[in-house]
């Protein structure tokens, strides 16, 4: 039986960079060794020097090209991972909407039957429950960005499973974002996940997600009522590798802030005994009036 193994492209790219870097160092060291008469061989002399130098140049050039390609493959893998998450979230949203559409008629029949049986209190409770489910989906469909809608829907469902009370406040259309939607989803996803992790074990965990925009920028806030971040960590929380979750973590907040700054925006944090809030913004692209006409 043939065993299939899943290839980790990012790990392979990292190994390729390391190996090729070592190759460059080894070739340069060999060239220096030979050119300084470290060995007695037929390659000594002007001809030998030319051959060794050409070999060093060719191998170094090849290794440098390999490193560049490995770096590009790593970046591509990162983007594909983000796109895969977005597609999964949109698929989940589509399934949820199809289920609700399918069940809507059944809900009406149940309510009608309860009213006919004069079970008004039971009908009222049933309507409230159904309305809550429909409202949770409609809340996540307020922006013009489908991937963001899908992400919010998926995270609201996850929060419900984890016992977190979520309030979604959308006062924006979020149309024509200046960065790819999957990158914005990666930023929001990281902040929401961190917030839910911080709420683990809290007696009344609450999460507030706010989306805003004005004439100049798109903005958001992810706020939770979990424990305060120690003041000594506030200045280093966005540094690469900083994490309280164990080794191998701690890149999410750094990537999120660099993503916002790459578009001329920023990501900040405020934390006290009452709440912890991450706030981000990116400026809207300037509209060319001639093109608008």
Image (spheres, grey):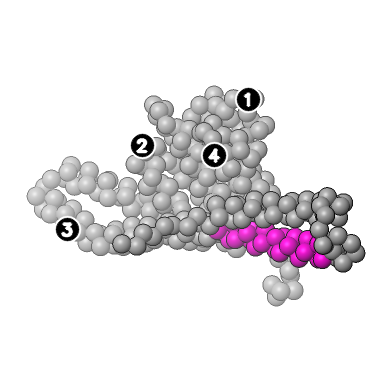
Q: Nearer the viewer, residue 277 or 37?
A: 37
* Marks 3,4: beta carbons within 8 A: no
Who comes first in sequence, dot 3 or dot 4? 3
How far apart marks 3 and 1 lie (CA) works out to: 56 Å
Q: Which one is closest to the eye, mark 4 or mark 2?
A: 4
The Cα–Cα distance between marks 3 and 4, rounded to whole angstroms, is 53 Å
The picture places residue 57, in percent across and down from the top left corner, at 79, 63
The image quadrant where one finds the C terminus is bottom right
Could you tell me if residue 171 is visible in this image? no
Q: Nearer the viewer, mark 3 or mark 1?
A: 1
Left or right: residue 155 versus residue 261 is left
Task: Determine which residue is flagged by label 1.
Answer: 231
Cα–Cα gap, marks 2 and 3:
31 Å
Structural crowding at the residue carrying mark 1, measured as other residues with C-alpha within 10 Å and reported as few (<14), some (14–19) or many (≥20) = few
196 left or right, relative to 261: left
Q: Residue furthest right?
A: 46
Whether residue 41 appears in magenta in the rendering, the answer is no
**Dot 3 and dot 1 residues touching (CB under 8 Å):** no
Label 4 or label 1, whichever comes before in sequence order: 1
Q: Residue at x 64, y 25 (%)?
A: 232
Residue with the mark numbered 4: 248
Looking at the rendered image, the disc whose residue lies closer to the viewer, 3 or 4, is 4
Which residue is tagged 2? 163
Q: In percent of the image, x 55 and y 26: which residue is there?
A: 228
Tell me the tag on residue 109: 3
Q: Which residues are magenta?
A: 51-79
Q: Is residue 113 visible?
A: yes
Name the residue at 11% across, 47% down: 118
Which of marks 2 and 4 precedes in the sequence? 2
Name the N-terminal-most of marks 2 and 1.
2
3D distance between C-alphas at marks 2 and 1: 28 Å
């Amino acid at each position: 039986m043939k065993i299939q193994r899943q290839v980790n492209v990012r790990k392979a790219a990292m190994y390729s960079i390391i190996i090729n870097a070592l190759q460059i160092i080894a070739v340069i060291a060999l060239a220096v060794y030979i050119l300084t008469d470290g060995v007695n061989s037929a390659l000594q002399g002007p001809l030998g020097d030319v051959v060794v130098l050409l070999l060093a140049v060719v191998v170094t050039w090849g290794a440098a090209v390999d490193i560049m390609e490995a770096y590009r493959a790593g970046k591509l893998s990162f983007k594909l991972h983000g796109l895969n998450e977005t597609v999964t979230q949109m698929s989940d949203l589509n399934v949820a909407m199809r289920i609700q559409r399918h069940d809507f008629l059944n809900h009406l029949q149940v309510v009608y039957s309860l009213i006919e049986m004069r079970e008004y209190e039971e009908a009222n409770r049933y309507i409230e429950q159904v309305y809550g489910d429909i409202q949770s989906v409609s809340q996540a469909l307020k922006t013009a960005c489908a991937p963001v809608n899908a992400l919010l829907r998926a995270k609201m469902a996850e929060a419900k499973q984890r016992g977190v009370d979520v309030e979604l406040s959308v006062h924006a259309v979020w149309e024509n974002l200046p960065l790819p939607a999957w990158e914005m989803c990666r930023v929001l996803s990281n902040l929401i996940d961190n917030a839910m992790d911080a709420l683990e074990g809290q007696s009344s965990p609450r999460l507030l997600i706010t989306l805003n925009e004005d004439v100049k920028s798109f903005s958001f806030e992810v706020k939770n009522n979990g424990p305060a971040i120690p003041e000594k960590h506030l200045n280093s929380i966005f540094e690469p590798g900083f994490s309280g979750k164990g080794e191998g973590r701690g890149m999410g907040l750094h990537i999120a802030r660099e993503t916002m700054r790459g578009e001329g925006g920023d990501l900040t944090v405020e934390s006290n005994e009452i709440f912890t809030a991450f706030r981000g913004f990116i400026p809207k692209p300037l509209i060319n009036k001639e093109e608008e006409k």
